[in-house]
Amino acid sequence: MSKIRSIEVRALAPDVERFRYTAFQDEVFTTTTLVRIEDQDGASGIGAYDSDSYGDWDRAPLETLRTLVPTLVGMDALDHDAVAALLTEDGCSPFPPAVRSTIDIALWDLASRAAAQPLHVALGGDPASTSLPSYASVALMDDEAAYLEAIDGWVDRGIGAVKLHAWGDPERDASLITAVRGRFPSLTLMHDAECRYSREDAERVARTCADAGVRWFEAPLPDFDLQGYRDLRRQVPGVPVIAAGDAFWDPRLMAEVLRDPPWDAMRFDVSFAGGVTAARSLMAVAAEAGMDVELISYGHTVIQAANLHVALAFGRTTYFEQAVPVEPWEHAVRNPIHTGPDGRAHAPQGTGLGIELDQDMVDAATIERVAVGDPR
């Protein structure tokens, strides 16, 4: 047994560029809630969760953890299932797991560091599998010309795939998709509608996506509009359709939903779904259904690393999502994950997540801190 000795939670408000993802939203304040856990032997691990808010930074995740983390001190840091059961309060009223994912990720980072293994290897993955093809995930821009100029630059740097976040206006979005395909005929292209379309507009844009050979059409409808997704897949079979991936995190519910699949692939984020422990269960559901899992990795580098390691371990993810521009997502990180000239995202070298933080920068971005236990 390796008992948890101390836990620290920080809310980070970095001084970075902020973005919009549709024309209907203001610029987003993305607060990174960072958790560090240390065990009695001195091993430590980190986990993170990014929350979006408008007008100010979001302290709610830290406040959620404030009363929870004291109950974890003294628990076995390597008993992931026991910790996960406590974190989810699995029973009649299971809690949404997003914020609690930070703890599970940190404990897996700790455990794989203590075992001197990269996380994907600790999860049973092939040590030789260390990278995935990457796509540039593009936030909202002013006009078509801005998108085309930006994509030119990424293609020149070796990126062979791009996902568009556009305006949420079906006619304008469809025009952009057509324009990008016309300029870049061999580019792998995805489109994320941020759940903004009606069913009728989703069908219209899906037909444009099919004509343009789009790799997948993401989030045309709210995640819970399962019948809308099923109808869309039948109406426009020429383009794969996937959800935003924010709403379905319970593997039992996912298994029920997939009895009549509404999507062509599953999608979730390790930092939303309950951490690595929950991701293992969701990957098992995907394997049973014979589906790919296009993991979300749009967020801070710690979140990117968790999703990349899970993707490498289970081999059901075809692309790594690289948020661009990259700089706002790697604050306080010494070794960020960048798509290389080979068009691939490579897992950081080292054990666990492989991420090294700059403590001075963490301190500078901290707006709230909670610490429990007896840190060394």
Image (cartoon, rainbow, N blue to C red):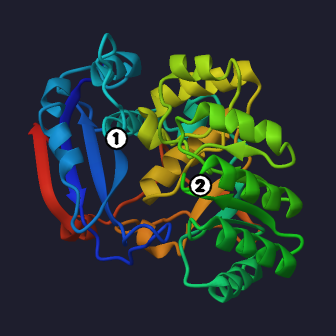
Answer left or right for 376 relative to 161. Answer: left
Q: Secondary structure at mark 2?
A: loop
Q: Quadrant of residue 368?
A: bottom left
How many residues crowd around disc 2 within 10 Å: few (fewer than 14), some, or many (20 or more)? some
Q: Which mark is residue 197?
A: 2
The residue at 53%/44% (across/down) is: 222
In the image, residue 291 sits, relative to residue 220, either above or below, namely: above
Nearer to me, 151 or 195: 195
Q: Position of residue 178 (x, y in %)?
A: 80, 73
Q: Amino acid at mark 2?
A: Tyr
Q: Is residue 246 left or right of residue 152?
A: left
Q: Residue at x 51, y 43 (%)?
A: 269
Place of residue 353 in the rendered image (x, y in percent of width and height, measured from the top left): 48, 47
Tell me the quadrant of the picture where the C terminus can be found.
top left
Q: Tell me if residue 7 can be seen.
A: yes
Task: Please state, as top left, top right, bottom left or bottom right, where the N terminus lies in the image.
Answer: top left
Residue receiving disc 1: 102
Q: Residue at x 45, y 34 (%)?
A: 273
> Label 1 neighbourhood size at 10 Å, few (<14), some (14-19), many (20+)?
many
Q: Which mark is residue 306?
A: none
Q: Observer-nearest residue: 336 or 325?
A: 325
The residue under the point 59% across, 62% down is 322
Do we see residue 159 in this rendering?
Answer: no
Relative to residue 110, is residue 355 depicted above or below?
A: below
What amino acid type is highlighted by mark number 1?
Thr
Q: In the picture provided, is 211 more to the left or to the right than 224?
A: right
> Tag 1's secondary structure?
helix
- Depth check, front residue: 249 or 67: 249
